[in-house]
Image (tube, rainbow, N blue to C red):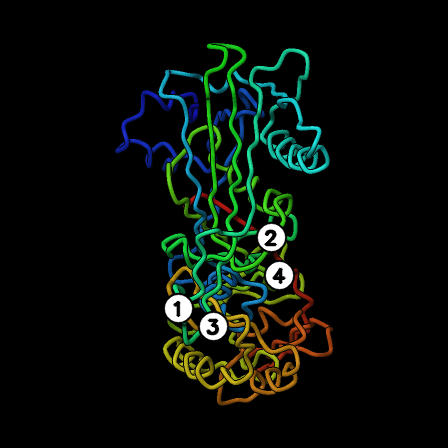
Amino acid sequence: MSIDDVNTSEIAPKDIEGLINPNDRDAIILTISNLKNPSRQVMVKKDCKTIAALTEEQLATAFYMYSLETNCDRTFTCPFKTSSTTDAVNFAHYKTFAFAAIDPNNSKLETTINGYIEKALLDKGLKINSENPDFIIQTFYFFDKNPNYSPTAKVPNEEKNYIYRYDTDKQKVLSFPFLFSMQAETEAPFLLQFGLRMIDQKGVKGRVLWECEANELLESSYRVDEYARIHVPLMLMQYPYLKYPRIVKFHVVTKDFNYTGLNYDIDHMNIIASVDSDSPASHAGIVKGDIIEKINSCKMDHTAEEFSAAYKAFITGSMKYRDTTTKFSDSNGFPRCMYWDKFKYTQVADAMANPVNLAGFSYLYQDTPYIDPTGNNIVTFILRRDKEKPEFNIHPIVKKSLTVEVY
């Protein structure tokens, strides 16, 4: 709503950067509003790094193929058809909801579906009010064999292409037995439809405020309640203000890496450019200007270009240790992303330890069994400081983050 008391409705786009990042202050106050909070203030502080320093978070992104299991940067689409009323409606005034009468013939299924919708809306800050709701929710669904299915219509693929969606409960991107939306309906043995609409009870009674519908082509049977569990949270990510009326694109980014607080000189990767205060590295006694001889058993006197070249060679050479059934494309379009084969973790760890692969930065994922089978997650740094060569055994902090957004 405002940036340091300056109303955002009065800000020109060219002025936003100056307000968000003022030269004379290290923090700003944002006043924000959403369905859960009509107005609240948040202080945002600057976190400044030297331009020539690489953080461990940046390196975790650069070397993410060491651990695709803990680093995910993926996009996926859902065949949602979404619409909202064209009337001038302030959705902030619609705070309560209830459900339409349940079909007694499908009471168990509809009660389950309504539970998923209720949870998603409560998470957004809305409240349930069965007596006098601002809007009523109706659901509709269909699942059956496709009467127009033609087995000969399906074009055979040499390689299986999977449909991926995000499961908010498991917090993972998983594969599903759906066909791509652009495929012909005759290729699908089964059809599934699921949708929900919100009917106005506060303003113009009976007006459809917002509606989302999915029509899926399926390769095999699939439960409607399970479809709702996965897709209701995704559908409602566009409520109340939709971005895509058809075919919604989502972006999922997860990061899970070891943090010691070291920042590396971008031109000399073995030199510590800075150390974050109150970090494991600072507590251990590592300081700016220290030179890293080794991280674990890997010598670090190499340039960024040499580390990058060795990393690319490692990706190619280690494909034989990947599980081909997990293949997917990342958000950058690289089509050969695969998890490590669980039966080849030992070979992966040995490859990481091979000096040729310059895998010193694999310590960022040392808490995984394919990097360090011992599970100790203690990283050894051998430094050069004046004429001394001190050794530091650091227990990193495992940092985790997750972002799911309409892209």
Circle 4: element type: helix
Disc 4 designates what residue? Answer: 282
Residue at image position (61%, 52%) is: 171
200 and 21: which is toward the camera: 200
Determine the residue positioned at 54% across, 81% down: 293
Crowdedness near tag 1: few (<14), some (14–19) or many (≥20) residues, C-alpha within 10 Å: few
Q: Amino acid under label 1?
A: Phe
Q: Disc 1 or 4, which lies upstream in sequence? A: 4
Q: Which residue is mark 2?
A: 222
The earlier-in-sequence mark between 3 and 1 is 3
Residue 245 image offset from top left, x and y in percent: 37, 36
| Local secondary structure at mark 2 | loop
Give the spatial CA distance, label 2 vs label 4. Answer: 53 Å
Q: Which residue is mark 3?
A: 271
- Is 78 displayed left or right of 145 in the figure? left
Q: Nearer the viewer, mark 3 or mark 1?
A: 1
